[in-house]
Image: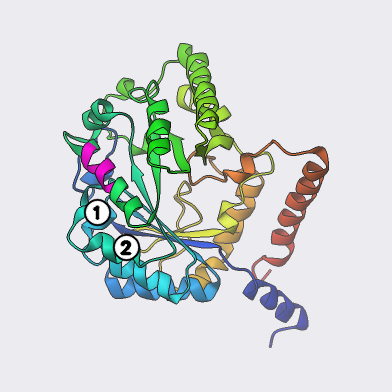
Amino acid sequence: MLSPASNNRRDLLSGSSPDSIAIQLTTRCNLRCKMCRFWKLQAKDPPYEKILSLLDEAYELGARRFDPYGTELFMREDMPEILAYADRIGFREIYVVSNGLLLNRPGLIEKLAAIKSLVIIVSVDGPKSIHDELRGNGVFDRAVANLRELGRMGIKRSIASIIMRPTIDHLQKIVDLASELKIEVISIQPFCLDLAQPDCDHAAFEFRPDEKKIVANKLKDLLKYARQKHVIIYTENIMKHVASYLVEGTNPFPPRGCHIPLKTLVVDINGNVHPCFAISKNMGNVNEMSLSSIWLNDIHRELAIAAMEKKCPGCLRACSDVEGFNTGINNQFRHFADRSAKWAVRYVKKHLLPLNN
């Protein structure tokens, strides 16, 4: 029989919930991008029924944002049905990243237009010559044409770009494209080493130590240009760390630690669950355990505390704790935020400990 203290602890655990669920839906892709290795992976897509079941579980647990991920999600014929289901059961935000090429499949955009919580993010890495060199001939024109069609159909859209050697001198063109298409918010993140093929020419994408200041200045100019064009770069908060990350491999932390493991669950193609996209440690498998039991288990608690205390590996991506990198706040709010961060660590340690402690 549980003691009153154990019952109180169980109540506190049951009150904890994620904001979002990310589910890897496929490793299939219609492109062979030079900077990516994931199209080489061969894994079976998770079944449609299992995905819907996970969405149900995540919603019941408290998640209201759905981030399907993979290589090219629209390689799945049932993708619009998955998105529509998430919207129908109550997910308020659904973000889909795509290379944009398959969006002109007959009837697809019409189905997507009915999903009001949906945002389509199309990858564009530079002007036509740069984008096509990285992703394939004709890809730029098709991606941009479908971005235009998304806008014509009233579908919320954005652009995602990667900072790397081939693109560093052309990122302002992305801002120009967003301005032309009346896209208010875009995402620009640094090239991730774990996205590269093992045998890729790293020198073609990465930067030398003597180029750190050059990279930093180019990104500073990019942010200034985006403000002039009234385009918001969602990842602006992390930009001051990008040069060190790209040149030296330095993984920074938000000043008050990372809170992403307290907000999300990431389910990979094999059903393994992680606290974020950067931490590879497996917290459990959805084919063997419920999402709720994984969310509340000891491993998750340990990883959440490690992230808040800056003891995880660290990362710098669009999925990082971008808000946590914001230092443009007044002293009064900073004092409050520092106290809140310390309280969060104490709360997790005190109340989200294993029941058998």
Q: Position of residue 36 (x, y in %)?
A: 28, 38
Q: Which residue is mark 1?
A: 103
Which of disc 1 and disc 2 is earlier in sequence?
1
Which circle marks residue 112 in the picture?
Answer: 2
Does any portion of residue 35 appear in the rendered image?
Answer: yes
Q: Position of residue 243 (x, y in %)?
A: 51, 24
Q: Which residues are magenta?
A: 141-146
Residue 102 versus residue 232 in the image, above or below: below
Q: Residue at x 61, y 60 (%)?
A: 301
Say what amino acid the circle numbered 2 marks: Leu
Q: Position of residue 241 (x, y in %)?
A: 56, 29
- List the single residue furthest toward the top: 210
Say what amino acid the circle numbered 1 marks: Leu
Displayed quadrant of residue 298: bottom right
Q: Is residue 195 left or right of residue 253?
A: left
Q: Residues within 10 Å of mark 2 (few under 14, many from 20)?
A: many
Q: Is residue 301 left or right of residue 38?
A: right
Q: Is residue 322 left or right of residue 74?
A: right
Residue 132 versus residue 93 in the image, above or below: above
